[in-house]
Image: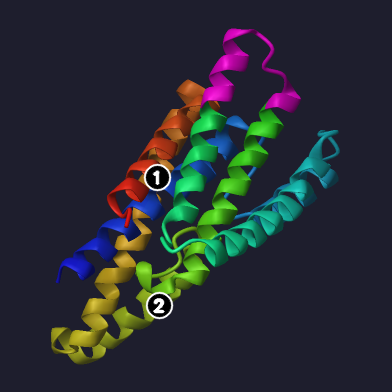
Amino acid sequence: MEIQKNIWYVTLLLTIIAGYCDTVTFVAADSIFSAHVTGNFIVFAYQIIKGSDLHAWVKLLTFPVFIFAVIVGGRIALRVTNRYTILFWEGIILLLSGIASYVFGYLEIFSEWTMYTVAMTTVFAMGLQNAFGKLYAKETHGPTTMMTGNVTQASLDLGSLLKNGLKDVEALLSFKKQLVTIIGFLVGCFLGAVAGKFFGLGTLILPGIAMIICYLYHRE
């Protein structure tokens, strides 16, 4: 029972953090998606066709950064016994990204390229979280950085419940699990939108601290 509760908490935390980071970078870093990196294809194409953004190509840099992060996550997993070590490094990177943002702002040297650098480090952090989700799928109730698959599963579960009623225990449990991921991500998006609009990239400190605490709680 304790393990099941732990999965619920970890799933909720990771989805909130992913939604938060994805929206913070979108709002405060030139519409860059840090978790849903494929969304950057759309933004890139739109900005190129619009012809009003000379730095649209920066969006494409998220892909090699993300791929490298996943590879690093895989290497970390091979070298450690505590699977949450990947999340620890994600937290460190987010924490340092937020601190750097505030420091550069305080020194009045926060330029456009500084903003892109912080955004890319956030992409790297989300790449580590994606690696964690793939390598340790049983630690969460589903993908925590991309909601399309979760929404699809929730829809299938809902269809089963409408047909068979609440007596379909398996579908009901699965539906509850998907709601945790979807609602968690939505909450994270809302918080990230507010934080990004009013406080900027420095608020990446918050998910960084949360991730480090998560690691310390699961330290073996």
Of circles 2 and 1, which is in front?
1
In the rendered structure, the answer to whether residue 21 lies left or right of residue 191 reads: right
In the rendered structure, the answer to whether residue 23 lies left or right of residue 186 reads: right
Q: Amino acid at mark 1?
A: Met
In the rendered structure, the answer to whether residue 182 lies left or right of residue 133 reads: left
- Judge whether 100 appears above or below 49 on screen: above
Q: What is the number of callouts on the image?
A: 2
Dominant secondary structure (helix, strand or loop) of the stretch shown in magenta:
helix
Q: Residue at x 23, y 86 (%)?
A: 170
Residue identifier under label 2 = 153
Q: Nearer the viewer, residue 86 or 130?
A: 86
- Res. 158 image quadrant: bottom left
Q: Residue at x 75, y 27 (%)?
A: 113
Residue 211 numbered mark, or none: 1
Q: Which residues are magenta?
A: 99-114
Label located before the other in sequence (2 or 1)? 2
Q: Quadrant of the C terminus?
A: bottom left
Q: Amino acid at mark 2?
A: Gln
